[in-house]
Image (spheres, rainbow, N blue to C red):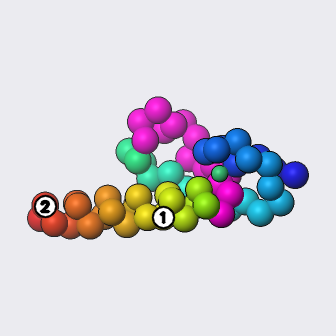
């Protein structure tokens, strides 16, 4: 059993999530974290939103 680093849920299904360099300054030392499916999907959405915002700035 692995534990999701984001919500603490114990699950057999976890994904390793690579945190972008300055994605979250508080977790900068942990480049890889485990995320359950809902959390990994949430992180994916947040990343896409972030990329969209950064692209719009240019
Ligand atoms: Zn989770």
Which residue is located at x 61 percent, y 50 percent?
32
Q: Is residue 12 left or right of residue 14?
A: right
* Identity of the residue furthest to the right in this view: 1
Quarter where residue 49 is shown: bottom left
Locate residue 53, reporting x and y percent. 23, 61
Secondary structure under tag 2 reads helix
Q: Position of residue 37 (x, y in %)?
A: 65, 63
In the picture, the quarter occupied by the C terminus is bottom left
Q: Characterize the local packing of mark 2: few (<14), some (14-19) or many (20 or more) Cα atoms within 10 angstroms.
A: few
The CA distance from mark 1 to mark 2 is: 20 Å
| Numbered mark located on residue 44 in the image | 1
Q: Is mark 2 within 8 Å of ligand 1?
A: no
1 and 2 marks in contact (CB < 8 Å): no
Helix or strand or loop: what does disc 1 sit on?
helix
Q: Which residue is mark 2?
A: 57
Q: Which residues are the magenta region?
A: 24-37
């Amino acid at each position: 059993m692995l534990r999701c680093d984001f919500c603490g849920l114990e699950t057999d299904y976890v994904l390793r999530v690579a945190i972008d360099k300055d994605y979250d300054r508080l977790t900068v030392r942990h480049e890889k974290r485990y995320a359950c499916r809902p959390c990994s999907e949430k992180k994916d959405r947040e990343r896409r939103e972030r990329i969209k915002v950064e692209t719009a700035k240019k």
